[in-house]
Image (spheres, coloured by chain):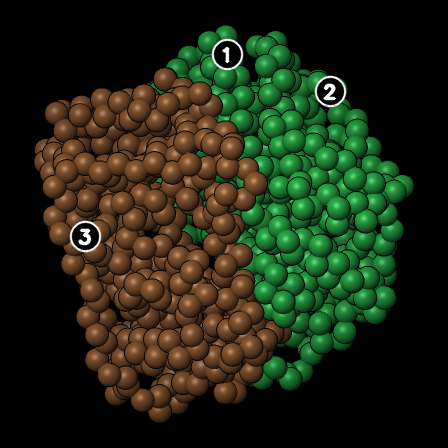
Chain colours: A green, B brown
Amino acid sequence: MTESAAPELSLSSFPLPPRHERVLGNGLTVIAAERARVPLVAVCLVFKAGSARDPLGKAGLADFVVELLRRGTERLTADQIDEALEAMGVDLHLETSLDSTYLMATTPAEHLAPLLRMLAELVQRPAFAPVEVRQARKRTIARLETELDEPAILAADALGLVALPGHPYGRPGRGIASQVATFTRADCVGFAKAHFRPSQAILAIAGDVPADEALALSERELGRWQGDGQELEPIPVARPLEQTSILLVDKKGSNQAQVRLASSGPGITQPDALAARLSCQALGGGFTSRLVEAIRVNRGLSYGVSGFLTETIAGSLFVVASYTKTESVKELVEVALEETRRYRQEGPSAEELLRAKRYTNGLFPLMIETDDLLARALAGLKRLGRPDDWLEAYRERVLRVDSEQALETARRYFLPGPFAAAVVGEAKGLSKPLRALGRLRVIPAESLA
Amino acid sequence: MPSQTKVRTPSRRPEKKARVLGLELAEPRPLDPRLFDLEEHRLANGLTVRLLEDRSVPAVSYYTFFKVGSRNERPGRTGIAHLLEHMMFNGAAKYGPKEFDRVLESNGGHSNAFTSHDLTAYFEDFAAEALELVVDLESDRMRSLALTPEALASEREVVKEERRYAVENSVLGLLDETLQALAFQAHPYGWPIIGWMEDLDAITREDCLEFFRTYYAPNNATVWLVGDFESGKALELIERAYAHIPSGPPVPPAASTEPPQRGERRAEVRFPAHAQALAIAYKAPAGTSADAPALDLLQYALSAGPGGRLVRSLVYEKMLAANLFVDFTWHVDPGLFSLLAELNPGVKADRALRAVDVELERVVDKGLTESELRRAKGLLRSHLLREIASNNGRAHALGTNELLLGDWRRALDLVRLYAEVSNDDIRRVAADLLRPERRSVATLVPDLALAGGAHD
């Protein structure tokens, strides 16, 4: 095979394990897939609510509540929970995104039953003991303060504030110290009751356990889980910015600045989301995108540069992310804007689009190679309401994206008009060049704790 | 020819079974021997080849390991191993500048690399159809790396930006660099893998060429393939592509001595941070030491998961630290067993150090609890299984084992070795390791007066 190989890609057969699905009496959707490579099994429990459901004035609550799930139930102390999970070799992964909350665990296959029993215990009977809530507040506030020394985290928060003002996606999901200080046990109980219930959850199990056994175990351990509540209102789609806005976070003593540029992108389930993703790949993905070539390869301005879509449900953001020494920020922003402008004009070349497709399809099997990746993908796809053959049909759908669609999504989404910029660095030396771009606001880093 | 490896089943010594909410934890299942059923070859020019077929996914992981790292550098040219790693993506005779990744991505693959103290590794993950192309790409750069002055000038700036990102604007990066420099007086492990800023400016094209000629010859390299291919055909491709690359001179020994440490060392670094941070390092044996499995378990028992002894004590109970990591990375030469903690605002490093000492003294005194040891074993076993579950993870694990420990089969023994470690072993290695006169302590102290570029 050479680089001039025929554009028709062979899609080597890739038999995915059959998925078995059951909706339990309490509304919990369970999906199981058996795959025996190593004697492990992965479990992913996803809730259809994430940080965007933090109540106003309670930024960080979703993240706070999910962390507390492992800090004690009505029957078990935090130490007992840790002891049981760790004896099973489980490093429980708790994660909150804007749209969803994940509890994930991988364990030797023989431990699936006790693992499900423990997960059931955590979600059905969280204690939220006052002492744990108090200590978690203290820990969270301390962590927020230490994260003032993490420029990339500050940049992500600042981008939300400037790109999505007033929108639930724009608030910092990791929390704001002054708001975390107000979290009560009642807040936690209320959030968990409203969002962590079986009809709002999907459980996916993948690995070296027969699917019918996994379903039966799920029924046995989670079938009695009860909970009800109202259907959640969808998150409204954010309005695009009317004028270019720049938020400069003054981080004293930095000799390098984090830079983010953003504009409105498609919601992950929108029909043009896949075309936008492939188009974005050519502009800012991998090691050969236009942005990488212009910023890293040709000019040595940065070690890391990427253009990506945030892939949220109620609209997303197209983001250019990079960093460079303070004195090069102006040049980096100019190059990024110019490359993006040119790309909007011409779209990807035939070779660039083909490369994006081949890259995406060639690496696709690795996106679901291991049990934990597969379980997460199955739960995530169900959470988005994707059709059952989504994985089987994915590479075909990639192939069908044409250059017109790629160009059109570039014009619609990749910084086409007013945009948002977040920069984290020493303000002295940055204010002047940034002011030339649009309306500039400068805040001290400390205001992001 | 195929190896006759047999995977031994994990120890069946009677152990108290753990109970979780009334459910007993079952005995571990044995691993499928096909996970390690590989072919071993060596070409006439010294290139070592390992081929492990696995058709689980239509993809291949292709690793090239060179037994060279920052350990093989000399003062004044620190960072050259890592800079050269970057340069390997900047063009060779057949595939010129910008071509390597472009061709690879065009054929359904991606690539990356890393440099450690002891080794440098390049890997590609790609659609099975692209194997011949990847063999061509990899052999091209081993045979005829271009190292053009233009690419070097640009890449040098990229690496300096990487250094600003990972060290100079990072609490843990800066503290770790300080700790390594404190712990080693003579050994190259004392300087940063990414190199000192001034050295990055001083490295010349000739330095790079010499480094490449010395360490990147086939006799210093091992190629690992794991995934969807046919071994006979893969070997043929590799022989055709690599056989004509001449072997290099014997690799010179690294300057790898370190005088014994005769007392505790302390260092302080000031940084415009919002909280103090603490780093502690004890001199530890090499990865080949018979004590390494017990030290791995000790590392896990102290810090893996919220139930790890130090995490539980410092993060949850005493709330002194926001994050705490314990590291015992296997090295060719004796390395470090180290701890890094980002402290909560207002907490003084000395107070956190005392809290750590209380816990470590208990380990020396009494070992771990039965539950701690069982959990550390459970977590380590899961992590091993998860690592070998992917093509890339298996190639990485086996290849690294081979280079650091001399034999990839060591990976097969690990499950058993971990299972056999007793609390007496833990107490013994802890007592040997955690000696005050062999430790170094570095603290990072906030100093906002540094704002304005007092550090470069």
* Distance of label 2 from label 3 (alpha carbons): 54 Å
Q: Within 10 angstroms of label 1, few (less than 14), some, or many (20 or more) residues?
A: some
Residue tagged 2: A56
Residue at the image point whose x is 28% and y is 53% from the top: B190
* Distance of label 3 from label 1 (alpha carbons): 44 Å
Q: Amino acid at mark 1?
A: Arg
Q: Viewer-nearest of labels 3 and 1?
A: 3
Within the image, what quadrant is residue B263 found in?
top left
Residue at the image point whose x is 29% and y is 66% from the top: B74
Q: In terms of sequence position, does the residue under pointer 1 or pointer 2 come before the other?
A: 2
Q: Nearer the viewer, residue B55 or B74?
A: B74
Give the letter of the chain under mark 3: B
Left or right relative to A259: residue B104? left
Left or right relative to B2: residue A197? right
* Distance of label 1 from label 2 (alpha carbons): 21 Å
Give the quarter of the figure containing the N terminus of chain A: bottom right
Image height check: is A173 above or below B382?
Answer: above
Residue at the image point whose x is 56% and y is 23% from the top: A64
Residue tagged 1: A134
SS state under label 2 = loop
Residue tagged 3: B334
Image coordinates for residue A243, horizontal then vertical, percent: 88, 42
Q: Nearer the viewer, residue B60 or B176?
A: B176
Q: Viewer-nearest of labels 2 and 3?
A: 3
SS state under label 1 = helix
Q: Nearer the viewer, residue B147 or B75?
A: B75
Q: Within 10 angstroms of label 2, few (less than 14), some, or many (20 or more) residues?
A: few
Residues tagged by mark 2 and mark 3 found on one chain of the structure:
no
Image coordinates for residue B161, horizontal then vertical, percent: 53, 57
Image coordinates for residue A111, horizontal then vertical, percent: 36, 35
